[in-house]
Image (cartoon, helix red, strand yellow):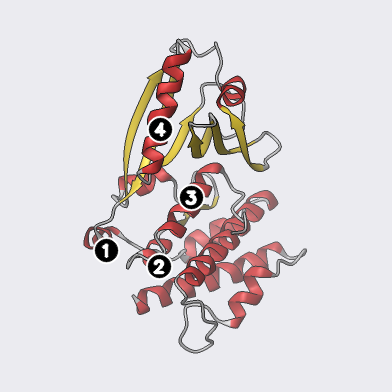
Amino acid sequence: MNDYITSSPEKSIIKKICCDICDKETSIQYLATLVRYDKKKKKICFASLKELWKTGLLIKKYVEYPYNTEKQLENGFAEIAFYLKRGGYIVHFLDVNVVSDDIVYIKDIFMDSREIQFVSKGFSGDIVEERASIEQYCNRFLTSENKRLKLRFDVYCYIEESQICKRRIVSKKIGFRDEVLCLSRRKKFLGDSRQVLCEWFQLLTNVLEQRQEFVIDDDNGIIDSRDMELFLKIPNQNRKKYLHHLIKRYNRIIQRIGQLS
């Protein structure tokens, strides 16, 4: 699977959730809830894990573990490894700014070899997936400046009950007023909005492929040939016009998802 999600480690988790639940009845509708215009950030964004938790599409458990001793540290990571085996998605909160996002997405923990596989975002803005020993991970992300000396995690899980999900899934187009606000922003905000919409489209096509439902249909399908050309071929000029067309096609896809659900 291509690593096309480069917005943040948190969005990498959302991508993983969508791909993991691709065989669920509600997976395509779930995708239709993930993008919105954020007035505070002044750009189009993915929904946060916290937002999805508040709407009831995910459940969350906060856990923390002391790490005053090496044994406590190992016990903490062993318990997180247990949550991972049960299908949990792990966010590790950092106490100092050693990466730009203040969180690390822990993808897996191998207690036999004492290694951690994780995704982080550096100050350069690059998303990097790495594998390191527990000792190397701790030397990099834990610090004596954390006076509480506690590991802090959010454990997210997808709700399996499809009927509950159906009641809570609310897809929403990007409205005219939000589009006007979005297109009036500076170049960087336009670029960020474009990136999110293109990442979302690639995630949609990825999930449809996994469901063996990826069909380019100009008449009745979720995706048509114009979508493929627009979202996957990014022009170098006229960013506002391009973003306007992306929003227009995004809204059309959301409408089709609603009609076919």
Q: Earlier in the sequence, mark 1 or mark 2?
A: 2
The answer to whether 153 appears left or right of 231 in the picture is left
**Residue 249 location, x and y as percent?**
54, 73
Mark 1 touches mark 2? (CB < 8 Å): no
Question: Disc 3 designates what residue?
Answer: 38
Q: Residues within 10 Å of mark 3 (few under 14, many from 20)?
A: some
Task: Count every numbered label the image shows and give the total.
Answer: 4
Q: Earlier in the sequence, mark 2 or mark 3?
A: 2
Looking at the image, which is closer to me, 152 or 84? 84
Residue at position x 69%, y 52% from top? Answer: 187
Work out whether 130 lies above or below 213: above
Work out whether 187 lies above or below 216: above
Q: Earlier in the sequence, mark 1 or mark 4?
A: 4
Residue at position x 41%, y 45% from top? Answer: 49
Q: Residues within 10 Å of mark 4 (few under 14, many from 20)?
A: many
Mark 2 or 3, which is nearer the eye? 2
Question: Disc 2 designates what residue?
Answer: 28
How far is the residue under mark 1 from the one under mark 4? Answer: 30 Å
Q: Quadrant of the C terminus?
A: bottom left
Question: Disc 4 designates what residue?
Answer: 80
Question: Disc 1 designates what residue?
Answer: 166
How far is the residue under mark 1 from the one under mark 2? Answer: 11 Å
How far is the residue under mark 3 from the one under mark 1? Answer: 24 Å
Looking at the image, which is closer to me, 167 or 80? 80
How far is the residue under mark 2 from the one under mark 3? Answer: 22 Å
The answer to whether one can see residue 102 in this image is no
How far is the residue under mark 3 from the one under mark 4? Answer: 32 Å
Residue at position x 32%, y 52% from top? Answer: 57
Q: Residues within 10 Å of mark 2 (few under 14, many from 20)?
A: many
Amino acid type for the residue under numbered disc 4: Ile
